[in-house]
Image (cartoon, coloured by chain):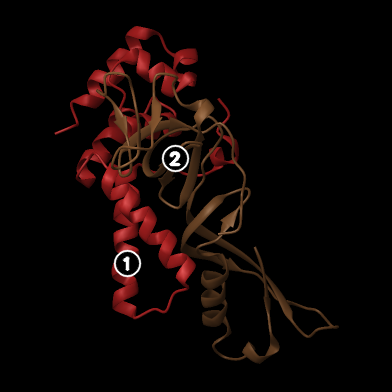
Chain colours: A red, B brown
Amino acid sequence: MNFGEFVKHEPLMLNEVQSILNQIKTDQTNENQVTNPNKEEILNKTLRYVKRFSRFQDKETISGIKVEFQELDPIELTILANLFPEDVDEAKVLIPSLAEKYSDEEITDFIERLHKYDN
Amino acid sequence: MNLRLHPRFFGPRIREIIREKVDSVVEGSCDPTYGFIISVVEIISIGNGLLDDETGFAKFPIKYKALVFNPFQFEVLDAVVISVNETGILTEVGPLVIFISKQSIPEEMKYDGESTPPCYKNADESEKIMNECEIRLQIIGLHPSKV
């Protein structure tokens, strides 16, 4: 699976994006910034989206996940956390590169460990 | 990126003006390589400006860090349905609009324009897709268009 140019950059989980956007909105209000309407629209649409689909509620959970799953490629981990597959078959369809690198037992183990973080 | 600056901005506030200009030019845009540029997070460096002796504008190479949304082919995403008709389903993933044509929708889901609201549903009506539904889809093709 080709992740494209994106490989050079840092992938973010939906929750992390939500924190960043909330901070940006707060800064905007505090500094009374004038922004262009295009930016406002994209910012608001993105914020609505991440609020709707964010799963993990706090920063400690996200750090915990990142520390625990260091063996995984950051992009694969981010997609796993964002899409949250229920079982190994779903995970293999969603992230084909996992199937190439890990056995079914290993993937099941990732999923079980990840599900423990969902409260 | 390279930023072109009119001479009227040359002065003590030039760095601040450059920052504002980068924000206004780049934020909210859609770049073919990097996707939607949602917000400039940090200006890493502003290089030395080079004067264009014909126009008087100065060109500054700028390095910045930004929050982007960069969808890629075959990516699987959760999307929100915004409209449904006989040709397919229109969905949104934040700023990205994704159209699912009828050919890409499972056969058992049929369009029902008579129902209120219009929706795609299967034979026993146990599954319905209508506005505001959340569906998981896979991107099969991408093309940038003006925002």
| Left or right, residue A64 beside residue A40 | left
Quarter of the figure with residue B80: top left
> SS class of the residue under badge 1?
helix
The quadrant in which the C terminus of chain B is found is bottom right
Cβ atoms under marks 2 and 1 closer than 8 Å: no
Please name which of the two marks, 2 or 1, marks the residue nearer to the observer.
Answer: 2
Residue in the image at 60% along x and 58% along y: B146
Q: How many marks?
A: 2
Q: Residue A84's spot in the image, x, y percent?
A: 30, 28
Numbered badge on residue B19 = none
| Tag 2: amino acid | Asn
Numbered badge on residue A25 = 1
Residue in the image at 56% along x and 90% along y: B12
Numbered badge on residue B85 = 2
Give the vertical position of A54 relative to A98 (above or below).
Answer: below
Judge the density around disc 1: few (<14), some (14-19), many (≥20) Cα neighbours within 10 Å: some
Q: Residue B134's spot in the image, x, y percent?
A: 31, 37
User: B10 or A82: which is nearer to us?
Assistant: A82
Residue in the image at 39% along x and 78% along y: A33
Subunit ID for the residue under disc 1: A
Subunit ID for the residue under disc 2: B
